[in-house]
Image (cartoon, grey):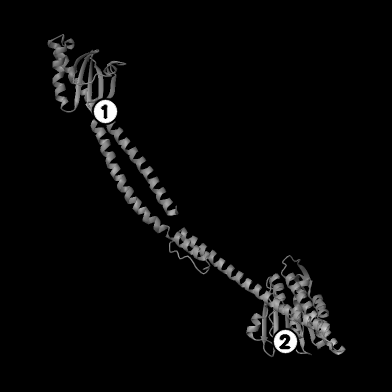
Amino acid sequence: MKLWQKLFIGTLIIFIIAFNAGVLYLTNYSYNFNRQKETDHGIREQEVILSSVTGRISNAEQFFTEAPFNYDRLTAIIEPIANFYKEQGVLLALFDNANTVFTDIPVTEDVENLLKFESLSSKNIMEKTIEGKRHILVASRLTDYPHLTFIYARDISDVDEFRADISRAFAIVNVAVLAFLGISIFFLLRHMTKPINVLIDTTNEIADGAYDKRAKVKSRDELRILARSFNKMAASIEENMTLLTKSAEEKQQFIDDLTHEIKTPLTSLIGYSEYLLAANCTERERTIAVGHLYDTALRLKNLSEKLLDLAYSRDENIEWERINISGLLDELTVMVLPVLAPRDIKLTTQSELTLLTGERTLILSMIQNLVENAARASEDGSEILVRAYMEDFPVIEVTDKGCGMSKLDAERIMAPFYRVDKSRSRKFGGVGLGLSIVTQIASLHGATIEVESKVGIGTRIKVKFTSH
């Protein structure tokens, strides 16, 4: 069952219970009020008639001393009064102790209860159904003639009819109001829950892969806030899915490039190995083949080392320390000497920084990769400058005067296995992972990388430790 249906049924049930409870209370209250009103009126009217009967008996007693005890005379006194009030729905009766003197009341059941009094001034009141109609019976003794009991019966069936009429009226009103309320609530709930249906439809579309879908809710209540939160969540999902897709594509590209990089040297290794095993070659040819095998094996070794560096740089469980920059640059000079010396490339280091917080091995590996990349882009006898200085934050900068690169190459240079000049990189043992390692290390240290390059002029790469 849908939410709006639950709300619709629940609201109607609550209304029916509350409305009918209110109607029942009002009906009973009105009935009891009118019933009490009729009872009070009957008591007052009984006192008036009783006073009249007493007065007439007293007058008759002045002429006939036996009148209070003579049933014929008593009947002659009360009968005219009874006939007058009978037309008004009032019945009268007169008893001498337990003996009936006169009565218009057709029932005799429970009459004996009306004849028992606690005191002379007390009244007995009873409700009795007479000929299908409710009557209020009021009995009291005549004060001057205590052996006589006067009973007054008044028709109060109008009260019951009133309750029946008002109950029917409320039943009609109940049906009418229920129908109106049901229709109103139906359309109101359909309108109010429309934004929920929009959210449901949008959720289904996003689940089917349409991550750019957003919920358009025009209400100004909590559903609008929910829609905003939902759209914010959808935007986050879209962003994460984009990143995941990009990451998956990059990983696939990495695997493809790695497969290609390994395939070429392996083919060379197998080819030259088969040549040495099967060919009848001279010593000079054998030496050349062995040299190619060595170069190819060295290239595979460099590739495996770079992959290990790349994997290590992605390990975020690193220990931070305060690094002495001058000592780090001195160590760098010794490490890159075997790469630069054969080509007579000069490395100049300048340090205006004293200390830098980070992981020493990773920072050193990052600068080494930058220098080696600069060397591959430089001509023999050129110069590479490494500077460490402070702007608004620490900066390590590597500048070369090599071949430079285009803006498009500068944007892609940090990708794994990407090489601007593949022939030059292969010539100097590059495997296209150095700058990818630099990117990983910089990211771990909260640093950003800026590449400035012009074709034929050179390249400047800045690592800015913006989080320090």
Residue 40 — which label?
A: 1
| Secondary structure under the numbered disc 2 in the rendered image | helix
| Secondary structure under the numbered disc 1 in the rendered image | helix
Residue drawn at (37%, 53%) of the image? 185
> How many residues crowd around disc 2 within 10 Å: few (fewer than 14), some, or many (20 or more)?
few
**Residue 165 quadrant:** top left
Residue toward you, 4 or 61: 4
Residue toward you, 158 or 17: 17
Residue toward you, 96 or 128: 128
- Name the residue furthest top: 66
- Name the residue tied to disc 2: 423
**Residue 77 quadrant:** top left
Of badges 2 and 1, the one in the foreground is: 2
Question: Looking at the image, can residue 346 be seen?
Answer: yes
Task: Estimate the x, y position of residue 429 in percent, counting from the top left.
Answer: 77, 82
Question: Looking at the image, can residue 396 be seen?
Answer: no
Residue drawn at (32%, 35%) of the image? 28
Q: Looking at the image, tell me whether mark 2 or mark 1 is earlier in sequence order.
A: 1
State how far apart marks 2 and 1 are (Cα). Answer: 120 Å
Q: Are marks 2 and 1 in contact (CB under 8 Å)?
A: no
Residue drawn at (28%, 23%) of the image? 126
Residue toward you, 22 or 76: 22
Disc 2 marks a residue whose amino acid type is Ser
Task: Estimate the x, y position of residue 46 in percent, counting from the top left.
Answer: 22, 23
